Structures are given as C-alpha cells and as structure tokens.
Amino acid sequence: MPTNDRKNGTEPVPIGPSVPATRMFRALSEERRQQAVVYLTQRAGAIYLGDLAEYIAIREGAPSRDRYERILVDLHHRCLPALVDTGVVTYDPATELVELSVPAAEIRPYLDLLPGGPN
C-alpha cells in the first residue's frame, strides 16, 4: 500500500483503502454477510450480536425465534469469522459485540455495487 511519510520521522501514514478490493469483495460475496455489513454501516459504534441477528431475521422475512437462533449460530460460527478474517469487522465472542474495523465511508462504494443497492 502506498504511504505518505510524516515530517517528524515517525511511521508512514497509509494512503488509500485499509482493506484491498479483493478482500472487500470476498467479504461481501455472501448475502447474509452483506446484510451484516449494511447494518453495521448504519450504526455508530459496536452493536450486540443479538441485534444484528434480529435485523437479519426481519430482512429475510417471517422472523421467528427458531430463525433468530439459527441466524445467531450462523453469524457466530460462519459469517462473522469470515468478516473478521477479511479485516472488515471486529467481533468479541465474550461480549458478543460486533463493530466495523474500517470507516463506513470506505465500505459504502462496495455496497452500492450490490444488486438493489445497500437496501
């Protein structure tokens, strides 16, 4: 990644996106991960896993307790680890808090490319 050296001789300051485009596309390659990222870009700060699961259950239609529980498990074991691996979010399983690890403004152009936009 290109850098811009600071005048005071400290470490260089990165220029450009903190997550490469290929990793961002990989993060957004699955619909449930897309929904999670869209929701996170609409919130300031960390959110609880349960709030994210509830949002996705409603978006997917016919929300029920069973569907909510299945989404919780899927987020915890599959979706969030994939988003963490790509550097898009941070997730603390102990507190069940999820947060963007890059600025929302950096993600929005990718969300605009999704079919139907970022919804």
Image (cartoon, rainbow, N blue to C red):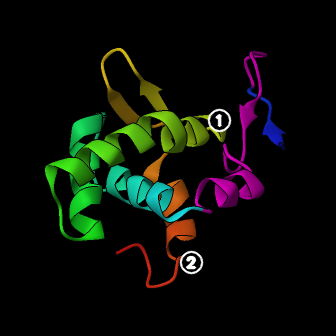
**Residue placed under numbered mark 2 in the picture:** 113
Q: As rendered, which of 114 and 57 lies closer to the eye?
A: 57
Q: Is 10 left, or right, of 53 in this rendering?
A: right
Quadrant the C terminus occupies: bottom left
Instruction: Report the residue at 44% width, 52% height from top.
Output: 104
What is the residue that sits farthest to the right in this orientation?
Answer: 2
Q: Can residue 102 be seen?
A: no
Asked whether disc 1 touches disc 2, contact meaning CB atoms under 8 Å apart, the reply is no
Please identify the dominant SS of the magenta region.
loop
Q: As rendered, which of 3 and 90 lies closer to the eye?
A: 90
**Residue placed under numbered mark 1 in the picture:** 85
Q: Is 82 left, or right, of 92 in this rendering?
A: right
Where does the image place residue 80, in percent across and percent down from the top left?
A: 49, 39
**Which residue range is magenta in the image?**
7-29
**Labels in figure, total:** 2
Circle 2 SS class: loop
Q: Is residue 19 magenta?
A: yes
Label 1 Cα neighbours within 10 Å, binned few <14 / some 14-19 / many ≥20: few
In this picture, is 96 found above or below 98? above
